[in-house]
Amino acid sequence: MRDETTLHALGARQHAVVTYGQMRRAGFSRHEIAHLLRVKRLVVMFQGVYRLAGAPTTWRQRLMAACLATGGVASHRAAAWLWGADLPGGEPPIEVTVARSRAPRPPGVIVHRSSDLTSAQVVRREGIPTTNPL
């Protein structure tokens, strides 16, 4: 089994969330990933997106997982919350914008589509790819 230090280092940068692709690029085999799921070291959040077991589930973690699952960026109310806006009702829904016409629609995630989303409009806020306030 590959040293899990690599896995935890990656998760530390992403609110304890990792993707199947990231794990494969880090050298984990399909069998090692399957083993980590079987022994509950990883918890499935969305298809191909996992939470490190033992890490508390948070709103930011769910938002990061949604961004990774869709290839999108935090947007709308979720982005406003990350930028410090006071919104009625506490934590907003998980909302992301994707730049392509087809993207996964994970359960519990509001997915917006934009044909003109550019990298210049995206910044990282608390490690999460987010639309800029403008």
Image (tube, rainbow, N blue to C red):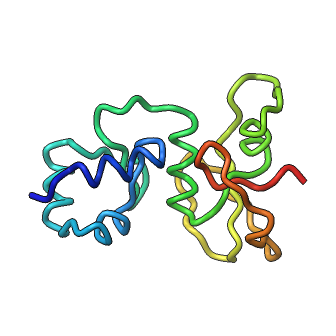
The quadrant the N terminus occupies is bottom left
Work out whether 47 lies above or below 107. Answer: below
- Residue 79, x across and y down, in percent: 75, 45
Q: Is residue 40 above or below residue 71?
A: above
Residue 92: x and y in percent read 71, 34
Left or right: where 70 falls relative to 121: left
Instruction: Tell which residue pokes out farthest to the top in this image.
Output: 89
Q: In this view, does 61 lie to the left or right of 17?
A: right
Q: In this view, does 16 lie to the left or right of 40?
A: right
Q: Which of 67 and 84 is in front in this view?
A: 84
Residue farthest along the left direction in this orientation: 1
Instruction: Locate residue 110, reporting x and y percent.
Output: 67, 51
State the residue at coordinates (74%, 61%): 122
Residue drawn at (51%, 32%) of the image: 58
| Number of dots carrying numbers | 0
Is 89 left, or right, of 30 in this rendering?
Answer: right
- Of residues 57 and 127, the one nearer the viewer is 127
The location of residue 118, given as percent across then percent down, is 77, 72
Q: Residue at x 53, y 55 (%)?
A: 106
Residue at the (30%, 31%) spot, across then down: 54
Quarter of the image holding residue 83? top right
Task: Name the foreground residue: 108 vs 84.
Answer: 84
**Quadrant that contains the C terminus:** bottom right
